[in-house]
Amino acid sequence: MSQTAALDLSSLFQPFSHGPLHLANRIVMAPMTRCFSPGGVPGADVAAYYRRRAEGGAGLIITEGTWIPHHAAANEENAPRFYGDDALSGWRHVVAQVHAAGGKIMPQLWHTGLTRRPVLENLYEAVVEDLSLKVSPSGYVMPGEKIGEGMTGAQIEALIEAYAQGALTAKTLGFDGVEIHGAHGYMVDQFFWHETNKRTDGWGGATLAERARFGVEMIRACRALVGPNFPIILRFSQWKLQDYTAKLAQTPQELASFLEPLADAGVDIFHASQRRFWEAEFPGSDLNLAGWAQKLTGKPAITVGSIGLEQEMLQTMFSPEPAAQSRLDRLIEMLGRGDFHLAAIGRALLADPQWALKIRGHAEAALLPYSVAALASLS
């Protein structure tokens, strides 16, 4: 008997609507960097890769991170960019393919800020690059390590405009919305985190609410260009690549002071990134980060973090062994009681484009297992 045979999966496959966004189910393909776009141009293979996930039943696809039109955004030449006629032509084809398969798709807009590019084979090492060409809030590449100076006010305003232009491009190309990458210690998150934002002007501050200003102004700028009826998702996290134990907010009240202004600025959906979705975020409640985001803002939330697999990302990053599948009991319980509205699937959906269809049919035995070998091609 399959693991899900006794589970009522109906909550996972209910349609979802929020404003102009209408999805066939609650399953989201999580953004996962693939680096199969030579020179930053997504080709026919990238379009086919995303189309397969739409055909396989994912309600919404969020693309891998794509570079906003800013000179310092990128740290990998084969990750896709979101500017230039050649790259935008490629993205237009991606949208057409996903829509032809009946799917919905949003790009994730990304800027790495001042970060060292990890080596895929060993995330604890980093590629040596000219970090002097990078920009950041305060010149900190990680906690306690300052290697430059922070951006000027004019540079910050230009960066905000680059995000807004990226959002407008997403609308122009026919995407179904846009996600802003505001998590994991990259550019937007570097403004949020006290370890990387040491500014003493209006773009910094001692409190998380004060440091949220860049995100608030950036979301407002995006909303001004795309109008009121184009969905904007913000991905955020407590943990950082520079520190897995980091916390932006220590209490629900502090989290509310951070998220509520972002919601007011125009965020429609919060994508709350955790390494393990089932873990409670604050003492005294079993709500996870997505659950708190939804409760505090009234906006729908996406949960993510090792759904479908027993091991979290780092445990599978270097192992040649297939990752063990996990039961969905906890996800169904949390979704069914309304903690969050959507669930983002990462590695499990990367390995098997038909993950959603197979789960719906209780056919776990037919699932293709995830292993590090899955990263070698766009299957």
Image (cartoon, rainbow, N blue to C red):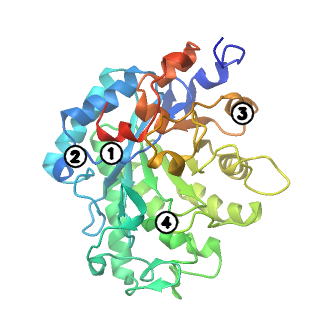
- In the picture of the structure, the residue carrying the numbered disc 4 is 185
Tell me how far mark 4 sits from mark 3, CA to CA: 28 Å
Residue 34's disc is 1
Q: What label does residue 330 carry, if any? A: 3
Mark 4, secondary structure of its residue: loop
- What whole-number distance in Å separates the C-alpha atoms at marks 2 and 3? 36 Å
Residue placed under numbered mark 2 in the picture:
37
The residue drawn where x is 66% and y is 11% is 1
Return the disc, 2 or 3, that comes first in the chain's sequence.
2
Disc 3 marks a residue whose amino acid type is: Arg
Q: Quadrant of residue 148?
A: bottom left
Kind of residue sitting beneath label 1: Arg
For the residues labelled 3 and 1, say whether their Cβ atoms are less than 8 Å apart: no
Tags 4 and 1 touching, CB below 8 Å = no
- Could you tell me the amino acid type at mark 4? Gly
Which is nearer the eye, 36 or 156?
36
State the SS at label 2.
loop
Residue 11 is situated, as x and y percent measured from the top left of the image, at: 66, 23
